[in-house]
Amino acid sequence: MPFQIIVCGGLAPDPLQTLEPVFDPARPSLRNELMLPAVFDPWAAHALYEAGHLAKQHPGSTVRVVSLAPKAKLQQVMMTVAQKLPFELTALDGPGGGFVDAAATAAALAGAIAALPDLDYSRLLLFGGWESATRGAGVVMQRVAERLGIREQFLAVDELSVEADGSLLIKERIEGGLHQISRCASPPAMLAWATGSLPEPPNHPQTGMANMRVIMPALQKAAAANIEPAAEYASTALPSAIRHTRIVKDVPAAEIAREIAGWIRE
Amino acid sequence: MEKILVLLHTVDGALPRAALEVLGLARRLGGEFDLAVLGAGAASAAQQASGGASKCLAVEGDAFSVSRYATDAAACEALIRASGAPLVLAPGTMRFHRALPGVAERLSAAIDTHVVSFTPDGVAGRWFYRQRIEATLRRQARPWVLLVEPGSEAPAEPAAGAAPEVLDVACDTRTAVEGQSAPLAGEQTIRPDAPLLFVAGAGWTKKQKDGAVHTDEAAGLILDFVRRTQCSLGSSKSLVDLSGEGQAVLPFLTHLHQVGQTGSSPRHRKGLATCCHGEEPHVVGWRFIQERRAVNLDPNCGWTRGKADVVYVADAFEVMRELLRLL
């Protein structure tokens, strides 16, 4: 059965960047936020790779990415992401940082998805990351799915296989380093992915060029998303813990081992 | 202090530690609270912990004995509506992480997750940007659901009270839970009760001094250490990243071992990192590790820049061989 796979994903600051909060009770932000290099949100990226893999296994399937982010930054990130696998983009131009309200973000994403042409719920799989690397709340995908009336939802998914009868066999992370195995009889379903099981696809410039032919017009048409603050912040700060590191070098391994063993036993 | 609903679920018929921590928080806040429990044996578990609660509610039955979105969301929605409390405190378990955001959407409620503090005047504390920024906030919207991070509160001693009102909840679902599995070839991952986290970095599978890769010996040393110390085992980089880059991987590491930006942020008193550079994307997962030590050949690695208490500049193979002789 061909699937309609929709992947929700935003942007996150490159994890190697230093982040410094700028306090504002209604709209906290990061210093130089618009200048920070960005990446496609890591867990959403895993969801996208899984979507591409699934689409390849089921001919006729489509992959559409729906993203809410500052348009200019999204265009930069898409130059790289578009080289990974074929997909279409629906872009919403709006704020994408960690302090942006999750409920309003979900409402904007759900509205954009509901407006997509030819949406067939009997073939619909809604993908995304289980948490973002920015807000890290893990609530947007469930809210989007609820707004779309999708009541079969899975969180921290590492594996999806489509069985011969069309059912979806899904492995979700649970406590204790285990996976819970569930069988969903049929789409629609929402799967919020953890890391999945696929490596990042290599860049494929021809795919990138083909993708960008549809992505650029989509970016130009990106509707503005009005995301109002819903929380009043009392503080934003870097963690205060400072460690004075003791560096031990030119010491025999046996002596280091004795010190570590003593520390473990303390 | 506004009225609170303490919303819990059972695990194997009893309230887990994370549930008792939320009960402890509600009692510490000092206001009026209701208690609601969902899952197998919910009514019995609720009665054993309902001392001090104004109202006690439960949802149980075969459909609610497993962790599944459709049934959990229906039960939580019914329990929150039946209580009517403006604040809902729940443990941040995977079961509630999956279900409660959707419930919040149904109730037009606000929700915050990974909450590590909550004050009587309604200020919640949580982390942003994967534990890199901490913030406190308050909300006007009600109901306000707060998922409290396990390990951030002292657990309450449960006190028995009134028997719960058991709600009758109906729900259709197309999903059947078939069981649980451990990752293939998986070794022990994060054990919340272990005092020590041991992290195996990508350096274990890189070329060593003799110009060769010693993956088998590395695997033997690490597994021997983990089994002797009963520590948690983490990795610095995801298996998918390593295999995608064409690097050798330790055969027992799975995605569940990964600590950091796209992995877990475990809570342990001590952490020992080996063959790991201490880059920020990994170290954000160490935010709740109190005492940190690292073994690395590079004296300029990230750990030496205020991220660890002690850094041993040494060959981890040699140190681990000696360490295993002592343990």
Image (spheres, coloured by chain):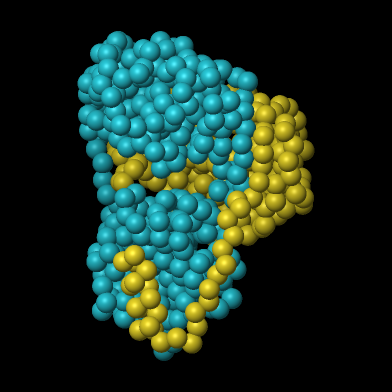
Q: Residue at x 35, y 84 (%)?
A: A254
The quadrant of the picture occupied by the N terminus of chain A is top left
Q: Residue at x 40, y 60 (%)?
A: B270
Instruction: Place residue A162 in its image quadrant.
Output: top left
Q: Nearer the viewer, residue A123 or B73?
A: B73
How many numbered marks appear?
A: 0
The quadrant of the picture occupied by the C terminus of chain A is bottom left
Work out whether B209 lies above or below A32.
Answer: below
Query: Residue B149: in sight, yes or no?
Result: yes
In the rendered image, residue A33, in percent from the top left (x then y), is placed at 74, 47
Work out whether B268 lies above or below A134.
Answer: below
Q: Color used for chain A?
A: yellow
Q: Nearer the viewer, residue B97 or B174?
A: B97
Q: Residue at x 46, y 32 (%)?
A: B147
Work out whether B91 lies above or below B257.
Answer: above
| Letter of the chain in cyan | B
**A235 left or right of B237?**
right
In the rendered image, residue B188, in percent from the top left (x then y), is placed at 29, 56
Q: Nearer the viewer, residue B178 or B318?
A: B318
Query: Residue B63: in sight, yes or no?
Result: no
Instruction: Place residue B201 in its image quadrant.
Output: bottom left
Q: Residue at x 29, y 69 (%)?
A: B225
**B140 left or right of B94?**
right
**A17 left or right of B31?**
right
In the rendered image, residue B77, in percent from the top left (x then y), is placed at 42, 17
